[in-house]
Image (cartoon, helix red, strand yellow):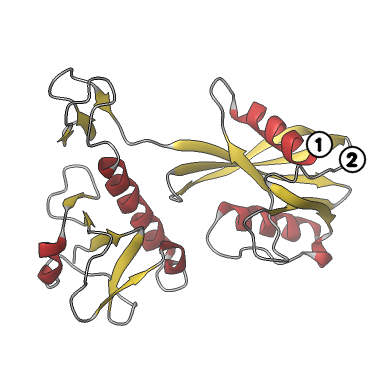
């Protein structure tokens, strides 16, 4: 049964005490709140839809709002990332209502899956921000940092957004050096993952320490350390590629 991925103020609408998604056939009470709606899959008019609700929407009885990051313990991995895709498309249309070239109001072009300006013809496709995330090793230990927004005691592998003119490998070298003041070598591709917070594509890598002593930049990370497999700190154990990289390191060195 086709689902409705409805969002209000960045949160997703759920029913049945936060255990189920609304569906297109039986949850028609939500429709009167829709500010905008669209198809999750291109040109699939009978499939799942996304919907934008007002930030101060009063939901019908039986519905509640949930933080999107909290979906993964309740739903499977496919549904978690599908909700991310739906939010990505909704947020893209919400923030591109007007042409950035001439200022005219844009229209959604379902054939191109783009926002089209009827005045000057400018096309804007869904915006994706590429980022790297890397597991750096040295003598059987993993480099992990405490991000400025992390709760106390939590660490993760280093990550950052790709800048204009950079290759992914160049971004790995720059981000690691900026955050830790070390140089890396033997950069190898690990895997990728869409990460809809808000619109990233994470490219995962492994690398080895080449030179330098670690020194946190204190802007993005406040603490950086080397951790052996048997002394891992707290880290996010959800569906993220950061967790996959850390678990892969532990498995290979245990």
Rendered location of residue 27, percent (x, y): 14, 71
- Look at the numbered disc 1 and give the secondary structure of its residue: loop
Identity of the residue drawn at 11% across and 71% down: 29
87 and 46: which one is in front? 87
Q: Is residue 63 left or right of residue 203?
A: left
Q: Residues within 10 Å of mark 1 (few under 14, many from 20)?
A: some
Please give left or right for residue 198 compared with residue 110 in the image: right
**Quadrant of the rendered image containing residue 230:** bottom right
Q: Is residue 39 left or right of residue 222?
A: left
**Quarter of the rendering containing residue 231:** bottom right
Task: Kindly identify which numbered label has been placed on residue 213.
Answer: 2
Q: Which disc, if any, is residue 181? A: 1
Q: CA distance from mark 1 to mark 2?
A: 7 Å
Under tag 2, what secondary structure? loop
Q: Is residue 144 visible?
A: no
The numbered disc on residue 215 is none
Q: Quadrant of the N terminus?
A: bottom left
Task: Residue 141: give x, y in percent of width and height.
Answer: 84, 53
> Above or below — where is 4 with respect to 147?
below
Q: Which image quadrant for residue 56?
A: bottom left
- The image position of residue 76, as x and y in percent, is 41, 67
Instruction: Please give the name of the residue rendered at 46% of the width and 51% of the height, measured from the top-left corner.
Output: 197
């Amino acid at each position: 049964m086709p689902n409705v991925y409805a969002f209000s103020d960045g949160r997703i609408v759920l029913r049945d005490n936060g255990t189920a998604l609304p569906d297109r056939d039986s949850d028609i009470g939500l429709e009167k709140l829709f500010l905008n709606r669209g198809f999750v899959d291109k040109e699939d008019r009978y499939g799942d839809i996304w919907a934008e609700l007002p930030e101060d929407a009063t939901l019908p009885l039986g519905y509640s709002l949930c933080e999107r990051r909290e979906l993964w313990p309740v739903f499977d991995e496919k549904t978690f990332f599908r909700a991310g895709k739906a939010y990505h498309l909704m947020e893209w249309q919400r923030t591109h209502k007007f042409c950035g070239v001439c200022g005219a109001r844009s229209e959604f072009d379902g054939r191109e899956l783009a926002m089209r300006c009827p005045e000057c013809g400018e096309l804007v496709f869904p915006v994706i921000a590429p980022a790297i995330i890397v597991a750096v090793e040295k003598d059987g230990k993993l480099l992990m940092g405490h991000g400025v927004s992390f709760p106390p005691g939590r660490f993760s592998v280093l990550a950052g957004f790709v800048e204009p003119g950079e290759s992914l490998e160049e971004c790995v070298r720059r981000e690691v050096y900026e955050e830790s003041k070390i140089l890396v070598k033997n950069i190898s591709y690990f895997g990728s993952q869409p990460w809809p917070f808000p619109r990233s594509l994470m490219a995962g890598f492994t690398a080895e320490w080449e030179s330098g002593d670690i020194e946190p930049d204190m802007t993005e990370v406040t603490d950086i350390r080397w951790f052996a497999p048997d002394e891992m700190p707290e880290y996010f154990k959800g569906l993220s590629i950061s967790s996959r990289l850390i678990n892969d390191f532990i498995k290979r060195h245990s």
